[in-house]
Image: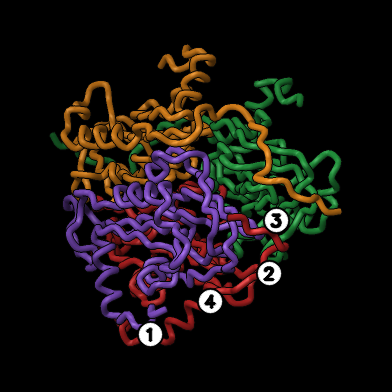
Chain colours: A orange, B green, C red, D purple
Amino acid sequence: MAHHEVQDEIVERIQQRILNGMGLIVLHSGHFSKIFRRMMGTNCSLKWREVGERERLWVVSPGHPIAEGLGEYFEIPHTEMYGEFFDIPKPDELVFISWFQGGEVFRSGCAYYRGKGKVFYFRPGHETFPIYYQEEVQRVLINAVRWAAPINGPYTDLAPANRVDPIESFEIQD
Amino acid sequence: MAHHEVQDEIVERIQQRILNGMGLIVLHSGHFSKIFRRMMGTNCSLKWREVGERERLWVVSPGHPIAEGLGEYFEIPHTEMYGEFFDIPKPDELVFISWFQGGEVFRSGCAYYRGKGKVFYFRPGHETFPIYYQEEVQRVLINAVRWAAPINGPYTDLAPANRVDPIESFEIQD
Amino acid sequence: MAHHEVQDEIVERIQQRILNGMGLIVLHSGHFSKIFRRMMGTNCSLKWREVGERERLWVVSPGHPIAEGLGEYFEIPHTEMYGEFFDIPKPDELVFISWFQGGEVFRSGCAYYRGKGKVFYFRPGHETFPIYYQEEVQRVLINAVRWAAPINGPYTDLAPANRVDPIESFEIQD
Amino acid sequence: MAHHEVQDEIVERIQQRILNGMGLIVLHSGHFSKIFRRMMGTNCSLKWREVGERERLWVVSPGHPIAEGLGEYFEIPHTEMYGEFFDIPKPDELVFISWFQGGEVFRSGCAYYRGKGKVFYFRPGHETFPIYYQEEVQRVLINAVRWAAPINGPYTDLAPANRVDPIESFEIQD
């Protein structure tokens, strides 16, 4: 509810930290946080409904490390619904698609490579339903944190444009 | 050179126009424009060099409409070099990869779906080299404009989150 | 039911026609055809059920040409269910996700670039339910045929490996 | 050279092992192996030349685990050239793009999710040049093996189509 109170300057600094390697895990209504919208470049809007209906999260990438330890699907008995169209870039890796009792679907586990960093959006969550106590949800979060951890890769600062010399001198022909 | 003078409010309005269906074609140094960086969510930084070297653009998606009418590759005899790592999201469709005489490569034709709209980044261009007079370059631009044209699809405004009713009434079980 | 009677030699020739530019539209139980499995490189297996339940196809790529003329979703009142995990490569462009009354979801509109050609899989269809008489279904098929049409692009035969000469003579250094 | 001597039945069994979780690392001329072509569904054809020229492999996904421990690029001083168009499906994750002295580029590190398994194609290799003794090449191979290792995920056999019951009984309406 207080997303708009987050200062743009702070958003900018978090964005640079992510692009330079930090992982970002965004949960539930964090889809409307300034940092997630900044990283996506889209509105991140969606449909929603709150009647405590049933949700099934289907694994659609069974070899992905974020699906480790899960079955073919898992259920959340009472949930707030988020439905498509979810205005995000096509996920680099789509791990879960949700089914909702009332007629909607949702891309619920979306993994992105951005700069040197990684972003994972996971849909479930609520302020009163005990969703974060479910074992499968905790398993996903543990897996996501491991997946998003920085690697020891190239580049120390992705922001500047760098002038570079050629591999060797060569003749420019007219 | 005057990218920073573009007001954020205007960038915001262009972003909304794109997400609601308008095509955006970004050329050459437009990679550092506010609107392109906003749409990508990344720094869009790269390596560069200006010695008038040779560039070859290889078609790596020969069935893509933006490759219509082209051969296996085309050359730009004197060009400003842009090199990887280009800090962009993985293109939804990668149409060209450039080779440069001095040792670099670049993802030179990058197509993105964003909201209801489409974005195409095309690398070539220069303020003095006659690159936009080349027939192949003009062919790519024509193809890109056609590809990015709006379609008559769903949704009239992607910004808001919409509350929706379920498909039918159902029993919530405890 | 007679997929296994299709000769491998014919499958091979169709595959070569696709890779050299021909579009392929695969419908419903065609997911188990030899040519689709050959093009995908996977089993293309799935879950299924036949109780005449309701299906909703949600558009998840509202700017895609295959979504032209559609609303946010369309419904099939009585359908055979196909459910995830659908053993296919990640679609290059995912246009539809289906919701089924009985608890499943499915990637129902899957677009692929392969060689110079294009492949589109569309889930709906049945031997008795009048699914192909629905206007939205016909609209999707028309759009898909247009999307998959060959373009006048590079390469005349993608099968052989080609020996090529360098761009110019250069010194090999030790 | 003896790819055609590998029996189709063996290829089929390896394919099933991969789809059910086994990792596959394909090196250099393995692009024309029956198993790689089967997994890709394409010809996997390319351009080639053997003059001992220089290659630079640029990292284009600096946060990817297969880029762990590498710099911005690494060089192979004498190499056999492989050039685009490489007839493969768009990689799920593109880690390296090669530059060659004689004018070509190549997608040299290509990662795929297939079924429960993973496939990584890595271009470098030769029967006389000492490429596999280079530290960076060995680093990539170690990283790739780790990335491709099976996870403890859902599904025990992806081949069959499974008939399933609905989540609960519901009324079919006319």
Instruction: Give A129 or B168, whichever is nearer the viewer.
Output: A129
Give amino acid for label 1: Asp
Q: Residue C109 at what x, y percent from top left?
A: 44, 58
Quadrant assignment for the N terminus of chain C: bottom left
Tell me, yes or no, whether the two marked residues, 2 and 4, touch with CB atoms within 8 Å.
no
Give amino acid for label 4: Ala
Tell me, yes or no, whether the two marked residues, 2 and 1, touch with CB atoms within 8 Å.
no
Q: Secondary structure at mark 3?
A: strand
Tell me, yes or no, whether the two marked residues, 3 and 1, touch with CB atoms within 8 Å.
no
Cα separation between marks 3 and 1: 40 Å
The mark found on residue C8 in the picture is 1
Residue depicted at x 61% and y 50%: B152
The mark found on residue C159 in the picture is 4
Instruction: Give A52 or C24, whichever is nearer the viewer.
Output: C24
**To which residue does mark 3 refer?**
B56
- In primary-sequence order, the first of circles 2 and 4 is 2
- In primary-sequence order, the first of circles 2 and 1 is 1
Tell me which chain the residue with mark 1 is part of. C
The mark found on residue C152 in the picture is 2
Q: Secondary structure at mark 4?
A: loop
